[in-house]
Image (cartoon, coloured by chain):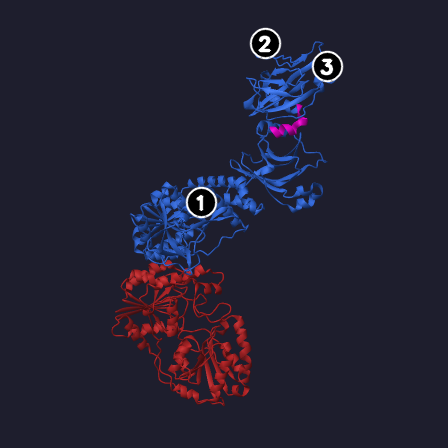
Chain colours: A red, B blue
Amino acid sequence: MKILVIAHGHPDFSVGGAELAAYNLFAALKAKPHVDEAYFLARTDMTSINNGAITMRRSGEYLWRQDMSNWFKLRANNVQSVHTVFREFLLAKRPDVIFMHHYVLMGVEIMREIRQTLPDCKLLLTLHEYAAICNRNGQMVKNKSNRLCYRESIQDCHSCFPEISPEDFWLRRHYVQRHFEAADGFVSPSQFLLERYVDWGIPRDRIWVIENGQPTFDPVPRVQSQTNKSARVGYFGQITEYKGVDVLLNAVHLMQPEARAKLSLEIHAAKLETQGSWLVELIDKLRLPLIAEGTLRWVGPYERSELHRRMSKVDWVVVPSIWWENSPMVIQEAFACGRPVICSNIGGMAEKVRNGVDGLHFEARNALDLAEVLTRVVNEPQLADELSANTSQPLTYSECADAYLALVA
Amino acid sequence: MHMRARVRGDDPEAASRSPVVIRDRTGTVSAGLGIDHAVVRDEILVASGWVIGASDIRFLDERDKPVQLLSVVTGYFERPDVSAAYDVPVGTAVRGFLAIFKNGQRPATMVTGGGIGETQASILIGPFYQDRPEDLRMLIDTHIERKGFLLQHTLNSKMFTGAITARLTPPPVSYMTAKGHLEQARGVVGVGGLIVGWSICARSAAMLLVDTLGIVTPLSGASRWNRADIVEGFSNTFGSDVQNAGFLQGWHAPLTIGGKVQLVVIDGTNAYIVSECQWSAAPVDPVSFARWSFELPTPLSGFQYRLEHHDGPVLQKLTERKNKAQRDIQSRTLVFGAPPENPLCSIIIPLYGRHDFMLNQLLEFSDDPFISKSCEIIYVVDEPRMLDAVIGESALLAQANQIGFKVVDGVVNRGFSGANNLGVEQAQAPYILLLNSDVIPIEAGWVEKMIQSLEENPKPGIVGARLLYANGSLQHDGMECWWSDTWGAYLNKHPASGLEPSAPETRAVPRMSVTGACMLVHRDTYAAIGGFFDGYLIGDFEDSDMCFKVRDMNLDVVCRQDVSLVHLERQSFNRIGGGSFRDLIARYNAWLHTGRWGHAIAAYQNNSTILGLT
């Protein structure tokens, strides 16, 4: 069996959860006995590659210079290349199966191209967020008000974007859905995301949940605290307006001083400076007093190889996102390290973390509620151990690959 | 005592143009007749002269039957020159006359009144009929004091009117019967135009517009509106006559750009030029013309009258002219991919405003085996500036969807009807499906169903389809007309629009008319009716117009309810009473549509009530 994995980025250049999931699927598939050949085609924006061209990254791995010019209709920028260069690539490799991760940055047209050029090839699309459903960066969060959005409709979408007519939203949905019809099936890393796509129009019998795989490694023993802090809580990931770091910092401010004195919060985060200045100013205003009093340690960015060591030094991992999330990688990573997770009680987070079993929920966007949860964890230091014992090892890359192969068997 | 001294034509003296004077035994003049001028121009005869002794005069034809006068100066006027020349005794009246006839009723003789005790005289008029160019001028010079009278009764004659107005002057400063000003006269040579200004006139006088050729348009039929500036400026002098001073008047006669047009008042025997201006060029494009003229703020309640008498005929002619010129412009057809060789149906889709609907349409077409194998898809680019974008996109879309289609470059904007007609000219298939670019199919098989309905019908005319709004509610299930008292015209309505679609009938349902957004017609039928009528402005009513043309051929109009497509139109309602440009255009179109089909609509509605269809 020849398998092609397509992704919207190569982790050599873009270390996002979806890119890693795609690449590790490819790597795991290569090792499977039934797989004769596996290829990885990743979209890139490297200007050293001519627009529309496909070049080799290393044997079996290819980069395709492509972009998306129309984010509204999720249309490829270089449509010509889809029907020429990409088609030739398909005909050269002639995969029996294509696992495609995400559609953004590449455009939805490639699915119909695959269907037309390789009619017998099985095509599965793995979904990573809600871009097909939601024009607000695929977040399903209301534009301007930032309220959570529960379901798209052309009228509601028009309310978010008054400059775009409901009729245009109808065209968008039909354009994307028609292209989705070219896929044989869909994979969602969470039940939550699956339900959203089913609501939107994907038939339930054509979509399945497969968790993103995680690397296997030796258990990480918890390094005991050398201070008088009774709970160490760590945040790992990027900081964007959707990640809820401001909610987290606010919650710490809202704790009673005596409880706060027992808390140590670590933020391991990259990219703050690349965010909008309003967010940088807000975070600065919130974090500086906490750093000064010793509650907050701003640790800064990390390499993936450093993650497990860093996680070994915290008791809890916190995921305070204000949007739904899908299947945040950091939750799998925390569980891989045996760390319980404090998270918002919505979407993919609420699904992956069982409240009171392997983590604690707080009401999304509610700093006061999070303050209470944090107060509880500093007052009940044994809770971290209790919940840690309930965490289970996530799916490995290899198990994940088996699940994918089972769908096309 | 009657003394007739008649002189007949066979008498040598008859050929002379001498007056006839009758003296009594003492040699004193008792009666007489003289003719100074008898000028015939166009269809008007004006005779002037004098009469001695009699109280009135009569004009008789060859058989001594009275000839109908158009008018004669009443009361006559004094002629001291005649009294002196013939030594007429004091007490015997000597009066001049000015009489006007239709030329077809030339009098042969003139006879003095036959009162008791009056001496009757008669004279042959024939010899006085003259045809020298200077006679007209001399006649007017003689009667310059009676120019108002003369003008009043010679308005049908360009030569008289032109010559008289050439002699008119502005009124004296003290003149207070009429005032006015011509602000614009804009027209198109060979078509007509509009004259705009204001005027105030006491009821005793009349105003009219005259050009240098002597063409006259009375101002009594002008469309008027109230002008606050005129009310403020002149109500002290003119009282309530200052109301509705603003006017516009259509000019449907020849004109020349730069030529003069004058506002003239006729006030009894007087006449003056109140104002004048020059013709300037109006937009030749009908919509641009309307954009200018519809700005003139006549009351909406009189808009229908105004269309009837002023702008309407001009707009109609401009539209005809434009369409005729456009039909001669060569188009060009480009082929993308490989369209079917012998198509059964040609789908004509005009592109105007935006072309990105092609993305969605072609996606759907390519997934419909009947369309991709048996239909010829023809996009007509009706907006030149989008041509490059359409062509660039077409190459990609043909590839992406593996479907062949044609793109017709219409070179100019031809409007809905023109673009469709152009597309049909290029069509090869026996069936024509007219489709709007914002109508998107949502399931395959719809074209076959529509064709089936046409083939099954013994009187196959037009087949329409059910259309839905993007939110799934009904947009179109056939059209009806309703009469608007406000507009004085029939308007189209879409019954049940905006509601949940009813359970569809699986057969074709008879309808008065169906929307042009999606209609199927046989090409022979389309050719027989000459396609869409292209007289509407911007686009409106073409579809119901076409349905009535088809009905005129005794063919059926039906709608397929089990064929649903999505029409990405915003739900609208008929705004009655609005005065925006689009509303006025709609009123124009409604006026035109009702003029063409009002009788047919009334007959249909009558019939269907009897049959219980409504």
- Which residue is label 1 attached to? B602
Residues tagged 1 and 2 counted as in contact (Cβ below 8 A): no
User: Would you say residue B149 sits in the magenta stretch?
Assistant: yes
What's the magenta bit mostly, secondary-structure-wise?
helix
The residue nearer to you, when weighing B501 against B187, is B501
- Which residue is label 3 attached to? B87
Say which quarter of the image contains residue B569. Answer: bottom left
User: Would you say residue B448 sits in the magenta stretch?
Assistant: no
What kind of element bears circle 2? helix
Say which quarter of the image contains residue A398. Answer: bottom left
Q: Determine the chain carrying the residue at label 3.
A: B
Residue at the image position 56 percent from the left and 81 percent from the top: A289
**Tag 3: Cα neighbours inside 10 Å, few (<14), some, or many (≥20)?**
few
Q: CA distance from mark 1 to mark 2?
A: 70 Å
The earlier-in-sequence mark between 1 and 2 is: 2
Spot occupied by residue A283 in the image (x, y as percentages of width and height): 53, 76
What kind of element bears circle 1? helix
| A55 is higher (above) or lower (below) than B145 | below
Q: Determine the chain carrying the residue at label 1.
A: B
| B488 is higher (above) or lower (below) than A182 | above
Amino acid at pointer 3: Asp
The residue nearer to you, when weighing B140 against B544, is B544
**Tag 1: Cα neighbours inside 10 Å, few (<14), some, or many (≥20)?**
some
Q: Which of the two discs, 1 and 2, sits closer to the camera? A: 1
The earlier-in-sequence mark between 2 and 3 is: 2
- Which residue is label 2 attached to? B12
